[in-house]
């Protein structure tokens, strides 16, 4: 059972455009939603994260939009650049105690290509 | 920012060999470390959760005797792939999370750069 569904699988965006990646989750116990960026041959790097008490978080060109009622969150990359070309993973975790707490459940990833 | 170092970055060895991968948190104490496996063009699959000073918790389907995890200190966890075979070839990634107590949930996981394991 996939608990975090990510779309699209791949995305091609023109330089300067907006890249949008969507994720949906099922487990209402999730309370932490990070996005990771991964370049080939490297480990994932934390990009930005959000908690359910806010609907939007912005850091530079990266914005997370969060819809608690719909159990969806998305990553927006403004003014996309060729250097943003990478694979992006959304994830979710819960912070309550017990088995499974703090473990990240990852989406399947989106390969973003930003073309000049 | 938080730095997690993983070593080696790449290893090639013969079938039947045991391989040890180290994961170190360089500038913070990591009470919990995680080990993942990633196949090409796929997502990260959690193998086990390692808490300092206690036994690792393995995910369903992961062989405990095959993938030995030791978390002997707050800055070091090791994964040993015992008697490795070609099907164990993969990209292994560790992550570390700092802190303890009620603020654990507020701490993100920081990932190492992975170890590419190739078994001939």
Image (cartoon, helix red, strand yellow):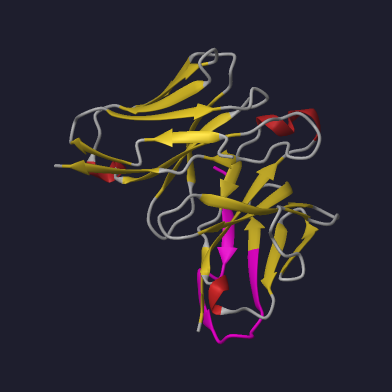
Check the image and report above or below for A42 versus B12: above
Q: Which residues are magenta?
A: B1-22
Where residue B16 sits: x, y (%)?
Answer: 64, 85
Along the horizontal axis of the image, is B34 left or right of A15? right
Residue B3 in view in this figure: no
**Residue B2 visible within the image:** yes
Asked if B116 appears above or below B93 in the picture, the reply is below
Residue B5 position (above or below residue A59): below
Image quadrant assignment for residue B1: top right
Depth order, front residue of A103/A46: A103
Image spot of residue A36 (x, y percent):
47, 40
Q: Is residue A40 left or right of residue A83?
A: right
Q: Residue at x 59, y 53 (%)?
A: B4
**B33 and B100: which one is in front?**
B33
Q: Is residue A100 magenta?
A: no
Residue, x 77% and y 70% (percent of image)? B65
- What residue is shown at x 48% (from left), y 48% (from top)? A44
Q: Residue furthest left?
A: A116
């Amino acid at each position: 059972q996939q608990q975090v569904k990510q779309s699209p699988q791949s995305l091609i965006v023109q330089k300067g455009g907006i890249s949008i990646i969507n994720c949906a989750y099922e487990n209402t116990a999730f309370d932490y939603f990070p996005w990771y960026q991964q370049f080939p041959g490297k480990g994932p790097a934390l990009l930005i994260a959000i908690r359910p008490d806010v609907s939007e978080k912005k850091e530079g060109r990266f914005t997370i939009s969060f819809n608690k009622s719909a159990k969806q969150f998305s990553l927006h990359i403004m003014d996309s650049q060729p250097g943003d070309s990478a694979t992006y993973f959304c994830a979710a975790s819960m912070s309550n105690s017990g088995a499974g707490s703090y473990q990240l459940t990852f989406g399947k990833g989106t390969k973003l290509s930003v073309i000049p | 920012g938080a730095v997690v170092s993983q070593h080696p970055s790449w290893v090639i060895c013969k079938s039947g060999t045991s391989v040890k991968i180290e994961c170190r948190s360089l500038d913070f104490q990591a009470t919990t470390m995680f080990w993942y496996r990633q196949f090409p063009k796929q997502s990260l699959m959690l193998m086990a959760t390692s808490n300092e000073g206690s036994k690792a918790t393995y995910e369903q389907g992961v062989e405990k005797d095959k993938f030995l995890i030791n978390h002997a200190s707050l800055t070091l966890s090791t994964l040993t792939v015992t008697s490795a075979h070609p099907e164990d070839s993969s990209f292994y990634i560790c992550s570390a999370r700092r802190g303890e107590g009620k603020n654990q949930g507020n701490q993100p996981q920081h990932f190492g750069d992975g170890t590419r394991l190739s078994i001939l």
